[in-house]
Image: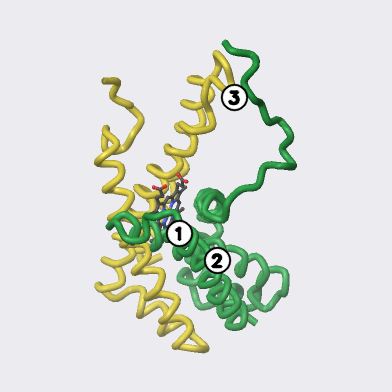
Amino acid sequence: MNDKRPVNLDLSTIKFPVTAIASITHRVTGVAIFLALPILLWMLDRSLASPESFADLKELMTSPLVKLVVWAILAVLLYHLVAGIRHLIMDTGVGETLEGGRRGAKLVFIISAVLILLVGGWIW
Amino acid sequence: MVTPVTSLGRNGLYDWLIQRVSAVIIGVYLIGMLGYLMCTGDLDYGSWKAFMGSVCMQIANTLLVIAVAAHTWVGLWGVTTDYLTSLTFGKAATGVRLIAQVAIALALVVYLLWGLVLIWGGA
Ligand code: HEM
């Protein structure tokens, strides 16, 4: 191998473009939702099992900590949803240029931030 | 060509399609459910139970849990085949990856069955 080729090992000089951040966040949120699935299933279970368990769940949902957890789960879901819709749109060939990709990635961050704030307001 | 035995559709094109179709199902459900919950306001047990027990919602919920299981399997298959490789785990990679994938598959089957019991068991 040619050992004179340039090597950049200074990670602090490497900046991820916004498209890469949008992409890895989609992946991280996908894994996060998987980890949250038992919580969601448990909540569905409690909400349907009996009037008592429904009331207990409602009572639990008044705790700020629980609200925070539910908000976090909805936040990763919403980001994954918005970025996923962008994915599907790009699959049809729309916005596949470098500029289009950048604009789409920024839009995903803006739209999901607005939606996440909205459900936050709804939870509280 | 090597056929990846652990991929859901047995080839990338099917997996790609399964991923998209399931994404649309989950996405439509999510938007609909969030809209319903946000518009209904203060929900009581009786109407929630009746709503989820309607044939319409039983079918939608069944489609949802199947879509989630398929979508998450294809998604995490991609993640495991990206990171659990000989680059990160050397010779142990195949074993590590298979153990992770079996654990994920087991979890997803349990969630799928749990979901179906919730939907149809009338618990
Ligand atoms: C239960 C909910 C969900 C879970 C657990 C989940 C999980 C995942 C995971 C783990 C991946 C793989 C990520 C990667 O390889 O980078 C993925 C990919 C994907 N998800 Fe989801 N997802 C869910 C819901 C959704 C929804 C609602 C959409 C909406 C439209 C969506 C759209 C996509 C798309 C398009 C991909 C493919 C990305 C690619 O090809 O690189 N997902 N999902």
* Image quarter of the N terminus of chain A: top right
Q: Secondary structure at mark 3?
A: helix
Subunit bearing disc 3: B
Residue type at tag 3: Thr
Subunit bearing disc 2: A
Q: Horizontally, is B56 left or right of A1 in the view? A: left
Picture colour for chain B: yellow
In the figure, the green chain has which letter?
A: A
Q: Secondary structure at mark 1?
A: helix
Q: Residue at x 31, y 62 (%)?
A: B25
* Image quarter of the C terminus of chain A: bottom right
Which residue is disc 1 drawn over? A99
Q: Horizontally, is A74 left or right of B16 in the view? A: right
Residue type at tag 2: Phe
Query: Disc 1 vs disc 3: Cβ atoms closer than 8 Å?
Result: no
Which residue is disc 3 drawn over? B88
What is the crowding at mark 2: few (fewer than 14 residues within 10 Å), some, or many (at least 20)?
Answer: some
Which residue is disc 2 drawn over? A109
Q: Coloring scheme of the render?
A: by chain
Residue A38 x/y as whole percent: 53, 54
Residue B84 x/y as whole percent: 53, 28
Query: Disc 1 vs disc 2: Cβ atoms closer than 8 Å?
Result: no
